[in-house]
Amino acid sequence: MAPANTFGTSLRGWRKRLSPVAAGLETPTDRRTLGLRREELARLAGLSVDYVVRLEQGRARNPSAQVVSALARALRLDPAERDHLFRCAGLAPPATGEVPLHVPPRVHRLVQQLGDAPVAVYAADWTLVGWNRMWTATIGDPRTYGWDQSNLVAGMFRSSGGHRVDSIAAWPVRSWAGDEAEEEALVADLRITAATHPDDTRLAALVDRLLHTSPRFAHLWSNGTAGLHVGDRKTVEHPVVGDLALDLDVLMVPGLDLRIVAYTAVTGTDDAGKLDALRGLLPAGRRTRAGGRGSEARS
C-alpha cells in the first residue's frame, strides 16, 4: 500500500483556500478560480511549477526545510498549520522565540472551574504563572516558596550544603519515585523547552546559572535525556491534615505552550477526605479565585 500523501493533500487544500487577493496578487475581476493556481503558488514561493505539481501529487516527498518555509509563507499559514506542514514533510517544526508567560482568560476560567482540586499553571520553562485557592490550601501559598523568578526548576535545585533543600514548596512535597527521578524528569522536560525556544535569553540565563551553581543540575543536564514530564505520585506533608498521597497530572494546553498541573486523590480514600477538609476551610464564595505571578487575578 502506498503511503498517504499528507503533505500534498495539505498543500493542495491550502492553495485552494487562499484567494489571490489575500496572497497579494492582482487578478482579473472575472476570474473563476477561487484559490491560487499552481503557477501562482510556485511564483510566490520561488519554486518551479513542476516541483509544486510533484509535491501535490506525492511524486516529490522530501522537500527541504527552506522549501517548506517558503510554501508556508506563500500560503499565509498560521504557526500550527506551518508546524503541521513541516511534520508532513518529516521535518521538525522551526524553533520559536521566547517562552510565553501569558495566561489567557480561558485558561484562568478553567483553573477557576477546577476549584475542587489543587490546580496551577506553569509556563513551558516551569515558571509558575497561576494557581487556584485549593492549590494554596494544599501546597501552600506560592508567594512563600522562595523560587528564583517563580521557577520550579530553580527552586528544586537550590543548594543547601550541596544537597537538595527539604521543602521545595511551603512544606515538603515528595515524589514516590524519589528525588533523583523527579529531578531528572523536570530537567529532561526543560531540555525540550530550551531546544524549542533557543532565543529566550531568560531561559538561557536560568540554565547557565544552574549549571554553575548546582552540580546535581549540571550532571542531569549533561546526560542528554529529553522527554515531557506528564505526571507523578506525591506525598504532601501537610501541616494541618497530615500526609496526603496525591496523583499529579500535567496537562498540555495546545497552541499555548502552557502546563496545567493538577493534584487529585483516589475517591473514597482518607486522602480524598483530607482534601475535602481543606476545601471546607476555604472562605465561602472565594474557593476558586486564581492567583498568579505574585498577586491574585480577579475572576
Image (cartoon, grey):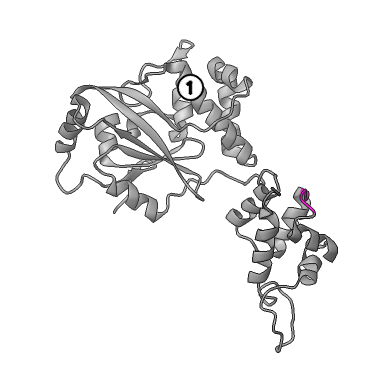
Say what secondary structure mark 1 lies in. helix
Magenta residue check for 110: no
Q: Locate the C terminus by quadrant.
A: bottom left
Relative placement, left or right, of 245 versus 212 is left
Task: Compare residues 21 and 269 and report the one nearer the observer.
Answer: 269
Q: Quadrant of residue 20?
A: bottom right
Task: Compare residues 16 and 118 and report the one nearer the observer.
Answer: 16
Q: Which residue in the structure is indicated by mark 1?
A: 183
Whether 158 is drawn above or below 117: the answer is above
Expressed as whole percent of the image width and height from the top left, the position of residue 54 reads 80, 59
Q: Which residue is located at x 61 percent, y 27 percent?
A: 208
Q: Which residue is located at x 58 percent, y 45 percent?
A: 98
Expressed as whole percent of the image width and height from the top left, the position of residue 201 reads 61, 39
Relative placement, left or right, of 52 versus 262 is right
Task: Compare residues 119 and 273 and report the one nearer the observer.
Answer: 273
Neighbour class for label 1 at 10 Å: few (<14), some, many (≥20)?
A: some
Segment colored magenta:
60-64
